[in-house]
Amino acid sequence: MSNSTVAELITDTLVQQGVRTVWGVVGDALNPIIDAIRRQEELEWIGVRHEEAGAFAASAQAQLTGSVGVCMGTVGPGSVHLLNGLYDAKKSHAPVLAICGQVPLAEIGTDYFQEVDNDLLFRDVAEYVRTVTAPEQVATMLTQALQAALNRPGVAVLTVPGDIGDLEVPKGTSPPRTVRAHPPTVPGGDGLDEAARLIEQAGTVTMLVGIGARDARAQVLDVAERLQAPMVLTLKAKPVLEKENRFQVGQSGLIGNPGAQAALDGGDLLLMVGTDFPYREWYPSGKTVIQIDARPEHIGRRTPVDLGLVGHAMPTLTALLARVAAKSDGAHLATSRDAYTEWADRQEQLTDPDHDKGLVGRIRERFDNPDTRIRPEALAQAVNRLAAPDAIFTTDTGMSTVWMSRFVQMTDRRELLGSFNLGSMANALPQALGAQALDRGRQVVAFCGDGGLSMLLGDLITAVNYDLPVKLVVFDNGSLGMVKLEQEQGGLPNFGTALANPDFAALARVIGLHGVRVEDPDALDDAVRDALAHPGPVLLDVLTNPDEVSLPGKVKIGQAWGFAVAKMRETVLSQGDS
């Protein structure tokens, strides 16, 4: 790499790291690096319409591949725009490198036009954040940035002033090299023996399994078999452990179900494996708790733990299997599974077009006035039934995630992405773009909320400009549905949640996508089938019923009362306005 410029060293290193796509918005401070990308045949530049979309897309690629994703923003405004997507990467432990432009070196600290202190701005979100001030630094700083992103893992930010990128690095500069060392860790024998003793003492065991067990599917199933334990899955573990798993009972929390609640309430011992499930109110009380996690800082921070085992899931469960005896009583498993399957059957009935044609339908028509609005359950089930067996799904935060969780089965080689830790809106579209850029021949389906899609609507253009054939399924209920539900559970009439949406399909057609609008439930299946079969990018705008309510596995009295009060207030207010 003798006589390479700073910009060339950066782009050559990215190629050596296996990076194939760089996301961002061009700008003068980044011009040397952008030009080096232009000359690098193995890198594709994808210019987004908002840097936040680029950060989400890079994070999606990192989560799917385990390799570093790369995004760029220039000087202050572009760097600030990256923040939300980078926070999602941080909370998802996705290895992402953000390269940011900066004002000329001599102007740093002078409150120059567009200047922002990037090292301060990114301090909370990044595992590593530095500004290059001399070409002699770039190889070392780039190495440190990549090592931090890959091995912690998380976000690294490298800021390059606009007048640094064209400078040559010293002759003989060694190219950056990275080492990825994640040797499996196993708890000590005493801890494993204690875990076996606690399990032996417990009459019944329930497992709560997260994405930390993604490499231990066989061991997780073996433990569940040995202990006759129902298995509650976090949403991030759904793609790994849902398929062909007779122990799983779905999710807990607001997207949960009675089977998961029965499993949590009915177990004497809760065995947590690779999960940092954050919702304290959904953990059972009065149980013996064992938590297995490779990150010691995760142990005990969500619920009190009787025994913490620091170790990776696969070797820890293997060692535990050698110590625990089989439990013969399968009643707890059977009860939990029965509750789950009965609930799943009821959910399936909601997708039947004839479901609302009887008395229930007349009541709904009288009070909800849904016209011909389509059940979101029916839409989600149609996509599940017709999508490819290896499709990648993304989902916006909110009600879209509820329908994804309940109706889309992670069969075969399907994968799932969402903003499951940060809980951001507007993530589904850019994550779908990132996933699609990895493989334009693989089906990528985004469950978009109308509110989320509206936030980054400009990046529909990105799908067209770069031939990214994403399938965008819009749950167009004219409402911020999850917020509406939260207000009503609190006894408040919904306010500020209504959305006056355009015809998203018509808008998509103007931009260059194949846009389809569905208002008739009888046209739903054909519309979904045609959308998924279309060779280019598609936006399927489906008018869904905003009054659909998703109940969690356990409804608290206060929530039910609050919902009733809110509905009465809404009725009174609506009559007062008429």
Image (cartoon, rainbow, N blue to C red):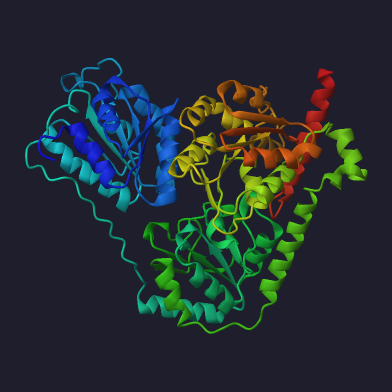
Q: Is residue 37 visible?
A: yes
In the current view of this chain or complex, which residue is farthest to the top?
113
Q: How many marks?
A: 0
Depth check: 569 or 248 in front? 248
Q: Is residue 549 visible?
A: no
Vertical order, 513 against 280 (above or below): above
Residue 444, by quadrant, is: top right
Q: What is the quadrant of the N terminus in the image?
A: top left
Residue 401, by quadrant, is: top right
Q: What is the quadrant of the C terminus in the image?
A: top right
Vertical order, 19 against 162 (above or below): below
Task: Give how far across and how far down residue 375 sits, in percent.
Answer: 76, 41
In the current view of this chain or complex, which residue is farthest to the left?
171
For image coordinates 34% across by 68% down, the residue present is 185
Q: Is residue 557 left or right of residue 438?
A: right
Q: Is residue 342 left or right of residue 99?
A: right
For image coordinates 62% across by 32% down, the residue present is 539
Residue 184, by quadrant, is: bottom left
For image coordinates 17% across by 27% down, the residue present is 164
Task: Give how far across and how far down residue 50 sits, in percent.
Answer: 44, 26
Q: Is residue 313 left or right of residue 17?
A: right
Task: Give how far across and how far down residue 197 sits, in percent.
Answer: 49, 81
Task: Give how far across and how far down residue 234 sits, in percent.
Answer: 55, 56
